[in-house]
């Protein structure tokens, strides 16, 4: 099935229901939402976009994002959402690797992409959405369950992004898991998109379309605590996906302003470690509104869930252990823990967390080698270390990769190291994550300069900003005469972390 059919169905059922909002202003009913999507699809077909083609979206959260997203699906193509925080050079690499037919962008992103030498056609999403005439007579293109719907790029340890092939079946499975395991949704509810649409927030839009909820894009185009409180009060019964750092900032803002979070019904948090003190403080401030999920791009939003009952429970004898876990397996998947030989471990034994089911990817885009390493006998090897207790709760204890999670966003050290090493005066570089009270972790770079060279942090920072996204650049630079290494020449990151 085509996941876009959910919009077509909802438009027939509730044509006059308010659907899409820019701040507090309604910009489309469900009928108008559907018509705009069909108009985009008609325009795409006129441009030569065919079923199975890839169409990129590179822009901040705004109503046009939904119109374009469903227009791409109506045309039978697959969407390639690109994090709006990425550097234009990084976005161009993704566009080229995905063999994109056409790219939508906001006006400011268009300029950046053209300056970076984008390949292929690029168009202003706002102009296309506003100038195309309604073509409501056109039907959406039929798609098979395993056809590509969403090509999600997630960085790998090599520093090169990998495209996760997310199918229509996976999106349906993920959405059904939401309704079964995470939360209910009705046409009286409202989704607030304060986190990037290219990631978790966007992935949850489908279930809200299916149930006819309202879709609200903050006027700030991002996350501002005061604005979230105001939108929640205005609309009531609001849902939101948030990184742990966003939850902490909401709590801190409420404690300063006296806001009680009225209208916030559910906050689903994921994307990084949630510290015990932070979720306890958030629950004390806002009450029983939090649900935690654990997923990866390779199994989007769909591995485990810690219910609102578990998050708020303070009476069970092991409530703290459960609060520190990521919950139980979601309904459409199986989760297990295996050792290095891929043998299943007993309860409470630590090993690699693995998952299989309808929410798991088919593989990486045009990357059979990494696909074969990650998918073994139908099981997705997550690369995360953890254990499952006797009650079925999954706990993460470490990451087998050197992934840094800052503000809910994944940052891979190797990617930053490669950029640093492009500087003519940097001979060695090693990047680690350091604890940060608000963002969870921050990026710290240890660098060894060419002998006799003097280079300050400002120059290193300028080099990084010219090649990677601002959020990936190191927040601190530590210059060393040499990096600590073992007898095999491998950099000892444990010693670097100890230096911090």
Image (cartoon, grey):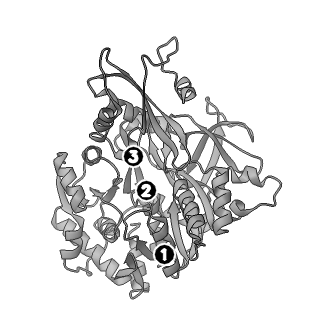
Contact between labelled residues 2 and 3, with CB atoms less than 8 Å apart: no
Task: Say what secondary structure mark 3 lies in.
Answer: helix
Q: CA distance from mark 3 to mark 2?
A: 16 Å
The residue carrying pointer 1 sits among few (fewer than 14), some (14 to 19) or many (20 or more) residues within 10 Å by Cα, namely some
**Residue 416 bears which disc, if any?**
none
Mark 3 — residue?
Answer: 471
Whichever of callouts 3 and 1 sits on the residue coming sooner in the sequence is 1
Q: Residue furthest top?
A: 487
In the displayed structure, 64 sits above or below 438; it is: below
In the displayed structure, 30 sits above or below 271; it is: below
Mark 1 — residue?
Answer: 230
Residue 199: x and y in percent read 43, 56
Residue 110: x and y in percent read 20, 56
Residue 25 appears in view: yes
Q: Residue furthest right?
A: 317
Whichever of callouts 2 and 1 sits on the residue coming sooner in the sequence is 2
Residue drawn at x 39%, y 84% as measured from the top left = 12
Residue drawn at x 52%, y 26% as measured from the top left = 496
Task: Say what secondary structure mark 2 lies in.
Answer: loop
Mark 2 — residue?
Answer: 199
Say which quadrant the C terminus sits in.
Answer: top right
Q: CA distance from mark 3 to mark 1?
A: 27 Å
Horizontal side of 500 relative to 461 (left or right) equals right
């Amino acid at each position: 099935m085509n996941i876009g059919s959910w919009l077509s169905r909802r438009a027939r059922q509730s044509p006059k229901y308010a659907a899409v909002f820019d701040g507090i202003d309604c910009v489309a009913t469900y009928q108008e939402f559907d018509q705009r999507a069909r108009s985009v699809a008609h325009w795409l077909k006129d441009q030569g976009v065919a079923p199975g083609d890839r169409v990129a979206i590179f822009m901040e959260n705004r109503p046009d994002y939904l119109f374009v997203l469903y227009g791409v699906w109506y045309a039978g193509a697959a969407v390639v959402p690109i994090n709006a925080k990425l550097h234009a050079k990084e976005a161009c690499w993704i566009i080229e690797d995905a063999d994109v037919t056409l790219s939508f962008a906001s006006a400011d992103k268009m300029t950046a992409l053209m300056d970076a030498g984008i390949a292929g056609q690029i168009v202003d999403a706002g102009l296309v959405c506003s100038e195309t005439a309604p073509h409501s007579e056109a039907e959406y293109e039929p798609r098979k369950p395993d056809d590509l719907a969403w090509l999600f790029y997630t960085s790998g340890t090599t520093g090169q992004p990998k495209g996760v092939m997310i199918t229509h079946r996976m999106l349906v499975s993920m959405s059904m898991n939401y309704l079964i395991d995470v939360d209910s949704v009705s046409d009286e509810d409202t989704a607030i998109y304060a986190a990037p649409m290219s990631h978790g927030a966007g992935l949850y839009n489908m279930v809200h379309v299916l149930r006819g909820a309202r879709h609200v894009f903050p006027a700030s185009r991002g996350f501002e605590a005061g604005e979230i409180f105001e939108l929640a009060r205005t609309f009531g019964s609001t849902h939101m996906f948030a990184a742990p750092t966003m939850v902490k900032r909401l709590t801190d803002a409420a404690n300063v302003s006296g806001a009680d979070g009225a209208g916030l019904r559910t906050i689903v948090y994921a994307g990084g470690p949630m510290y015990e003190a932070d979720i306890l403080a958030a629950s004390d401030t806002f009450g029983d509104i939090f649900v935690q999920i654990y997923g990866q791009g390779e199994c989007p939003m769909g591995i485990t869930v810690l219910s609102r009952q578990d998050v708020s429970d303070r009476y069970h004898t092991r409530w703290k252990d459960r609060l520190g876990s990521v919950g139980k397996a979601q309904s459409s998947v199986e989760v297990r823990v295996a050792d290095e030989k891929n043998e299943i471990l007993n309860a409470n034994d630590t090993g690699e967390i693995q998952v299989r089911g309808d929410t798991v990817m088919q593989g990486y885009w045009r990357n059979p080698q990494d696909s074969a390493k990650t998918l073994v006998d139908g099981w997705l090897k997550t690369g995360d270390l953890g254990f499952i207790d006797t009650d079925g709760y999954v706990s993460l204890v470490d990451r087998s990769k050197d992934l840094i999670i800052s503000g809910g966003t994944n940052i891979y050290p190797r990617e930053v190291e490669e950029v640093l090493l492009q500087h003519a005066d940097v001979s060695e570089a090693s990047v680690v994550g350091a604890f940060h009270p608000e963002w969870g972790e921050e990026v710290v770079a240890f660098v060894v300069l060419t002998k006799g060279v003097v280079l300050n942090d400002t120059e290193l920072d300028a080099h990084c900003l010219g090649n990677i996204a601002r959020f990936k650049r190191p927040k601190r630079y530590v210059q060393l005469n040499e990096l600590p290494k073992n007898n095999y020449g491998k950099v000892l990151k444990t010693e670097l972390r100890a230096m911090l």
